[in-house]
Image (cartoon, grey):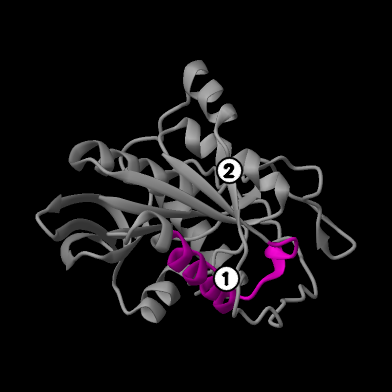
Amino acid sequence: MNILVCIKEVPDDSVAVTVVDNKAATADITPVVNAFDTYSLEMAVRLKEEVEGQVVVVSIGDEEVKNSLKNCLAVGADSAYLIKCDDYKNLDTKVITDILLNAKEQLEDKLGAFDLVCFGKETTDKEASQVGVYFANKANLGVVTSVIEMKLEKDNLITKQEIDGGYREVETKTPSVVTIAKPNYEPRYPTIKSKMAARRQKIEDIEVSDVNFDLILEEIKDFEPEKRQAGVKIQEEDAETTVQKAIELMVEQKVL
């Protein structure tokens, strides 16, 4: 089974971001593979281990993104490719989709057709949740979003999709596209041996063609969310007085 996993490098979301001069100060935050993309890669590798095949990872970015691609090789990807683009952080969603589709076509000429294309359900820097769906639509492929489990039965992909209030099972024909939510397990850690092997492995560049790069987003302003006001603790001697005090406070704040 041929699986393509599309990843993005983002600022580490475990680090608090401050806003300086109306811009998010992320320059000193270490870039990492987007969290949902790590889940996507882990699920792809697990599926490959069950049915055999290969997992190919691709990312848009500058030369430094190769470090993240090396990390993907260390946790189970078989090969990795970089689509060179220095302005990748400001590309419009539709441009990103066109770039990835172009890269997919080039890789299929070299490696054979992909049975499955995997995306994280969203990126932690933009949270748009659009690229996977746009990609499936333009490629005329079926898509299942927010997947937390998947397995292959002949040519059918059986997925467990996370929805409001629960889950549902969705079946699609391959080739298809999935966007991955957080499963009930964590991505595997690389070993020293796998890190050394990944370091020696070559990451090839892909040059895209027939893509309009004119749609560049300009972020006008970043701002921090409003800080919550301190709560009020009601400490009365009995429940009746406590309820009365709570109602008075809510009436005073015009929430009743």
Nearer to us in this view, 172 or 86: 86
Q: Which residue ends up furthest to the right in the rendered image?
A: 21
Please give the residue where the numbered disc 2 appears in the rendered image.
203
Q: Earlier in the sequence, mark 2 or mark 1?
A: 1
Residue at 42% across / 57% down in the picture?
Answer: 110
Nearer to us in this view, 235 or 82: 82
- Which residues, given as a range, are shown in magenta? 85-107
User: Is residue 12 among what the camera can see?
Assistant: no
- Residue 89, compared with residue 138, is above or below; it is above
Q: Is residue 121 left or right of residue 178?
A: right
Q: Which residue ends up furthest to the front in the rendered image?
A: 110
Q: Which residue ends up furthest to the top in the rendered image?
A: 192
Name the amino acid type tagged 1: Ile
Q: Is residue 127 magenta?
A: no
Q: Is residue 95 magenta?
A: yes
Q: Is residue 54 left or right of residue 168?
A: right
The image shows residue 109 at horizontal and vertical percentages of 41, 63
Residue at 47% across / 71% down in the picture?
Answer: 101
User: Is residue 135 among what the camera can see?
Assistant: yes
Please give the residue where the numbered disc 1 appears in the rendered image.
96
The image shows residue 124 at horizontal and vertical percentages of 57, 55
- Residue 75, compared with residue 96, is above or below; it is above
- In space, the residues marked 2 and 1 are separated at their CA atoms by 20 Å
The image shows residue 31 at horizontal and vertical percentages of 68, 44
Name the amino acid type tagged 2: Ile
Nearer to us in this view, 116 or 236: 116
The image shows residue 236 at horizontal and vertical percentages of 52, 44
Q: Main secondary structure of the magenta part?
A: helix
* For discs 2 and 1, the disc positioned in front in the rendered view: 2
Within the image, what quadrant is residue 177 found in? bottom left
